[in-house]
Image: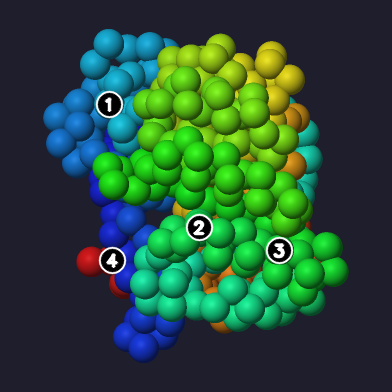
Amino acid sequence: MKITSIELLSVRVPVPQEEVERGKIAGFSGVRLQTDEGITGYGFGGVNPQMFEDRVKPKLVGKDPFAVERHLRDEVLGPALLHCAPVEHALWDIVGKAAGLPIYRLLGADKDRVKAYLTCVWRGKDDQSHIEPEDQATQARKYRDLGWQGIKVRSWRPDPMEDVRAAALIKQATDGKMEVMIDRTAHHPGAVWDWDTAYKVARGLEQAGATWLEEPFDRNDFSGLARLAEAVDIPITGGEGERGLLRFAEFLRRGCFDIVQPDAVGSGGLLTIKKVSALAESFGLPCIPHGSNGFGLLAPLQIIGALPNCEWLEVALVHPPLTPQEMWSPLEQLLKEPPLFQVEEGHLLVPDKPGLGVELNEEAVEEFRV
């Protein structure tokens, strides 16, 4: 089998603008690969356009889609694929379809369903200061009543102890039955906590019963991350902004994180995540990949199904009061057989169809292509 063509896709289904503004997902960007045996592979997410045109297309056309490892080792194609991970996802989609198996079964089949947490960002101010912690707790209770078992909220308020209070209120409102993750992820100049603030917040989150604290310092501050991870009991997590293996190896060697969080697109693809997971496993640590929403969840869900040290899937970004199902419902116009995902008691079932696990309606894709 050989790859015969590679193209970028952008698809937008007709959704009223007010619904889009509420948070409904109106389409996707991605790639489509064709083969000489009639199998089509899709990958969802953004790519580096220059690397895609200059390196990926000329180097990958005519090649074997099964040779993912070989492609990643290529001096020109390999670095480009790390910046164009949806192409790597599409290769796996082809491999799975050729084998008649979903990707997670090809890579180890650890589980066929994954517990999900919702990363909630309320429309309005990015720092969420327009939302009262009590309102966040009320919404969390609604999600818990629907079966969701975890929620992640930002700690971006000017007074981070208000975010600690929000975590405590969420735990109280859900009778302690909902995990609460806290996302700092503010590594830009002027937004990074100093040591005293980070330590105070971490200790406060411990008392509130929070599950983890994500990226409290600059991503290059290895010593600060390691010091905090050693000093507090709440797990310190991170890694969504890293690409390839070397940085994760350094994080683990230095003890920066208790949980590593590679991204299915940003970190370089599914095989890279599998390797990061193995690195973390060798240190006795979890690997819980950074998530997405809509079609962007397909690749993370498949690889998590193959990881022995991952118990959570992140559904991001969810805009309350919408549910994830409401957010991705417009995309089902592009499917031959909805729904996009099956949800049972707060778990997403890993799609069991070949490849990434969905069958697109090609006529609808072409109709709504932009």
Place of residue 295 in the rendered image (x, y in percent of width and height, measured from the top left)? 49, 57
The CA distance from mark 3 to mark 1 is 44 Å
Neighbours of disc 4 within 10 Å: few (<14), some (14-19), many (20+): some
Place of residue 121 in the rendered image (x, y in percent of width and height, measured from the top left)? 48, 67
Along the polypeptide, which appears first: circle 4 or circle 2?
2
The CA distance from mark 3 to mark 4 is 45 Å
Looking at the picture, which amino acid does disc 2 mark? Pro
Along the polypeptide, which appears first: circle 2 or circle 1?
1
Task: State yes or no: discs 3 and 2 in contact (Cβ < 8 Å).
Answer: no
Looking at the picture, which amino acid does disc 1 mark? Ala
Neighbours of disc 1 within 10 Å: few (<14), some (14-19), many (20+): many
Q: Could you tell me which quadrant the N terminus lies in?
A: top left
Disc 4, SS: loop
Along the polypeptide, which appears first: circle 3 or circle 4?
3
Q: Nearer the viewer, residue 284 or 42?
A: 284
Which residue position holds label 3? 168
* Side of 39 where 9 appears, left or right: left
Residue drawn at 41 percent across, 26 percent down: 221
Quadrant of the rendered image containing residue 321: bottom right
Residue drawn at 72 percent across, 35 percent down: 233
The CA distance from mark 3 to mark 2 is 13 Å
From the image, state whether disc 3 or disc 4 is nearer to you. 3
Residue drawn at 83 percent across, 63 percent down: 177
Rendered image: mark on residue 80: 1
Looking at the picture, which amino acid does disc 3 mark? Ala
Disc 2, SS: helix
